[in-house]
């Protein structure tokens, strides 16, 4: 998948985001190739509030689309005068709920019975989390995404290198 090695993605992310990483799981490097582990990407405010997240590795076009969605949604929030924390939460709750409805067929305004049987993929689960609890602090959500959505364990174990 290697979306971060794509020049267009790199240029777009570097133009409007501060990019960093944090290892929270464990994996093995065998002969220079990463084996195991997983990845989650977060788009946050300068204060560390999560506007959006991507659970798992994705192709470059998907990462670029999601990054652009964050930028355009943030611009729309400003136009909607969602400047207070409460208004911004409502705005992002609606934005994630709308994507959940459009892309995953889950309507939070319907009863559980009407939504029964909906199977959500990783991205659908992320939209559900962010629609029900918008703008969480990164430290409040990263473990939930990594362990419950991606089914990985948070670990401080060092990376093991094997092979040549």
Image (cartoon, rainbow, N blue to C red):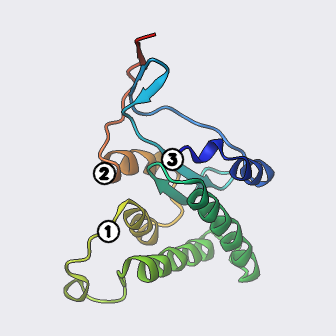
Between marks 2 and 3 in the image, the one whose residue lies nearer the viewer? 3
Q: Quickly name the residue at label 3.
A: 1
Q: Are marks 2 and 1 in contact (CB under 8 Å)?
A: no
Q: Are marks 2 and 3 in contact (CB under 8 Å)?
A: no
Residue at position x 36%, y 50% in the image:
144
> Does 34 appear above or below 131?
above
Residue at position x 66%, y 73% in the image:
73
Between marks 3 and 1 in the image, the one whose residue lies nearer the viewer? 3
Comes first in the chain, label 3 or label 1: 3
> Does 85 appear above or below 11?
below
Q: Quickly name the residue at label 1.
A: 120
Picture coordinates of residue 81 (x, y %)? 73, 80
Alpha carbon separation for disc pair 3 and 1:
21 Å
Q: Are marks 3 and 1 in contact (CB under 8 Å)?
A: no
Q: Quickly name the residue at label 2.
A: 148
> Does 67 appear above or below 84?
above
Comes first in the chain, label 2 or label 3: 3
Q: Is residue 22 left or right of residue 5?
A: left
Which of the pair 11/126 is nearer the observer? Answer: 11
What is the secondary structure assignment of the residue under circle 3?
loop
Q: Residue furthest top?
A: 164
Dividing the picture into quadrants, the one containing residue 79 is: bottom right
What is the secondary structure assignment of the residue under circle 2?
helix
Mark carried by residue 99: none
Residue at position x 39%, y 67% in the image:
124
Alpha carbon separation for disc pair 2 and 1:
13 Å
Dividing the picture into quadrants, the one containing residue 101 is: bottom left
Picture coordinates of residue 5 (x, y %)? 64, 41
Picture coordinates of residue 152 (x, y %)? 32, 41
């Amino acid at each position: 998948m290697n979306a971060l090695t794509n020049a267009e993605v790199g240029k777009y992310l570097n133009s409007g985001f501060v990019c960093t990483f944090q290892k929270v799981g464990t994996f093995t490097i065998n002969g220079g190739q990463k084996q195991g582990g997983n990845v989650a990407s977060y788009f946050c405010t300068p204060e560390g509030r999560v506007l959006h997240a991507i659970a798992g590795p994705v192709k470059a076009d998907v990462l670029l689309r999601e990054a652009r969605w964050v930028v355009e949604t943030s611009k729309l929030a400003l136009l909607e005068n969602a400047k207070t924390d409460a208004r911004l939460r409502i705005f992002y709750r609606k934005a994630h709920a709308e994507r959940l409805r459009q892309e995953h067929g889950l309507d939070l305004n319907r009863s559980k019975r009407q939504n029964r049987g909906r199977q959500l993929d990783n991205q659908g689960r992320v939209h559900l989390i962010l629609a029900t609890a918008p703008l969480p602090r990164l430290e409040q959500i990263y473990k939930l995404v990594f362990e419950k959505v991606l089914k990985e364990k948070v670990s401080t174990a060092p990376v093991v290198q094997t092979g040549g």
